Amino acid sequence: MGWIIKNETGEVLCRGSAHRPFVCFSALMAEALPIREALSKAKDLNLRSITILGLMQVLVNASAFRAGSE
């Protein structure tokens, strides 16, 4: 699992990855875990605006909706 945070010009601000055997029971979970990690890091960096790109658009849309409601 991995994620990358870039600024608006495409410069990499930070990246992360993790190996978690037997954690992902579905493709949805496999996509959700790195999004959660990236959102946590974005919060630590005090980023006010983010764009999430992912393979599973349903999960990306749900993440954006939830982030906007907090």
Image (cartoon, rainbow, N blue to C red):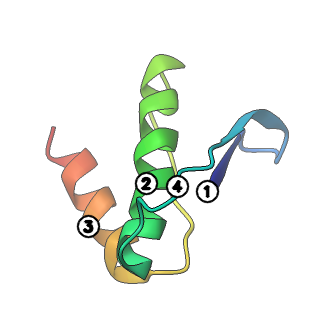
Q: Nearer the viewer, mark 4 or mark 2?
A: 2
Q: What residue sits 26% from the left and 67% below the top?
A: 62
* 69 over 13 or under it: above or below: below
Q: What residue type is disc 2 on? A: Leu
Q: CA distance from mark 3 to mark 4?
A: 13 Å
For mark 3, what is the residue? 62
Neighbourhood count class around disc 2 (C-alpha, 10 Å): few under 14, some 14–19, many 20 upward: some
Which amino acid lies under the numbered mark 3 shown in the image of this protein?
Answer: Ala
Q: Are marks 4 and 2 in contact (CB under 8 Å)?
A: no
Residue in the foreground of this view, choosing between 16 and 10? 16
In the image, residue 63 sits, relative to residue 57, either above or below, namely: above
What is the three-letter code of the residue carrying label 4? Thr
* Crowd band around label 4 with a 10 angstrom C-alpha radius: few (<14), some (14–19), many (20+): few
Q: In the shown orientation, is residue 27 left or right of residue 62?
A: right
Quarter in which the N terminus is drawn: bottom right
Between the residue at mark 1 and the residue at mark 3, the CA separation in whole angstroms equals 19 Å
Q: CA distance from mark 4 to mark 2?
A: 16 Å
Q: Which residue is mark 1?
A: 1
- At 85% from the left and 39% from the top, the residue drawn is 11
SS for callout 2 = helix
Q: CA distance from mark 3 to mark 2?
A: 14 Å
For disc 2, the marked residue is: 33
Choose mark 3 or mark 4, whichever is in front. Answer: 3
Q: Using the image as rendered, state which of residue 7 and residue 62 is in the foreground.
A: 62
The answer to whether marks 2 and 1 mark residues whose Cβ atoms lie closer than 8 Å is yes
